[in-house]
Amino acid sequence: MQITWLGHTGFRIERSGAGTILIDPWVDHPKSTDSVRAVDKADLILVTHGHGDHVGSLLYIAEKTGAVIVCIHEIAVYLNSKDIPNRIVGMNKGGTAVFEGVRVTMVHADHSSSIQDGNRILPGGEAVGYVLRFDSGHSVYHAGDTGVFGDMALIHRLYAPRVAMLPIGDHYTMGPAEAALAAELIRPECIIPMHYGTFPVLTGTPEALVQALSEELKGRVLALAVGQGAELE
């Protein structure tokens, strides 16, 4: 499995039999690179919520790749009103949608959601996270924008994700101390920090996350550079 950080909360996941999956592919952020912006393929795009720093590149990438878009129902209604030719799968928390080679389960996130449409701010349903379970048995949890919440223990109990992508920037999401507690609840084999460093207000760092983690989990942090990929077995 190849996982590439696109910056902020954006990721590209590539696995044989499951195609190319993009999560929150906002590629025009301040820390972006030419290689990140040059998105040329996607089979599936997962959207965690409607804020511009998560969907700012969505329409462009969707049109370019023809990917299926998965999102919460309210965002699906909005996208359908835009006559996007892509297949749009609207769902809700607790539900699972099955695609070739992967089961996508929408889970809770503790955050707000809205959509800016010109000068209007529209309701965007609720913010979510995703658990991806591949036919190979691998499982990946993308927490979306969230604070820590106790039911992350249920995500561990139900899905036992091997990889967890956790926001650490603070201010708009949980910071390193809260993310460390989230990791204790989820207990993944690999922790990939996200949603930090994009703007000055996002002050959390991978180093602070490692410092806050228990000794058992400190060695499980994989801090990627923007545009960097990692092969995970």
Image (cartoon, rainbow, N blue to C red):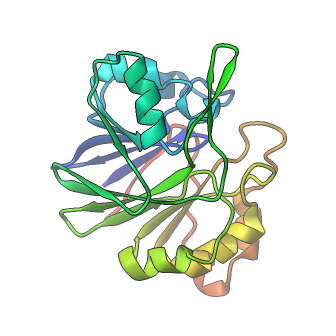
* Whether residue 45 is situated above or below residue 152 in the rendered picture: above
Residue 23: tell me if it is visible.
Answer: no
In the picture, measured across the screen, residue 113 lies left or right of residue 10, that is right
**Could you tell me how many numbered marks the image carries?**
0
Q: Is residue 137 visible?
A: yes
> Which residue shows up at 67% across the image and 84% down it?
214
Judge left or right: residue 45 versus residue 47. left
Q: Quadrant of residue 151?
A: bottom right
Give the left or right position of residue 195, taking residue 140 as reference: right
Quadrant of residue 181 in the image?
Answer: bottom right
Up/down of 227 relative to 220, above or below: above
Q: Give the residue at x 42% y 25%.
A: 79
Question: Percent x, y for residue 118?
Answer: 64, 13
Residue occupying image coordinates x 70% and y 14%: 119
Residue 100 lies, in percent from the top left, at: 16, 48
Between residues 26 and 208, which one lies in front from this camera angle? 26
Camera-side residue of 59 and 93: 93
Residue 9 % position (x, y): 57, 44
Q: Of residues 214 and 110, which is closer to you in this image? A: 110
Position above or below: 55 against 107: above
Please name the residue shown 67% across and 19% down the image. 120
Q: Quadrant of residue 149?
A: bottom right
Residue 60, compared with residue 76, is above or below; it is above
Which quarter of the figure is the N terminus placed in? bottom left
Quadrant of image for the C terminus: bottom left
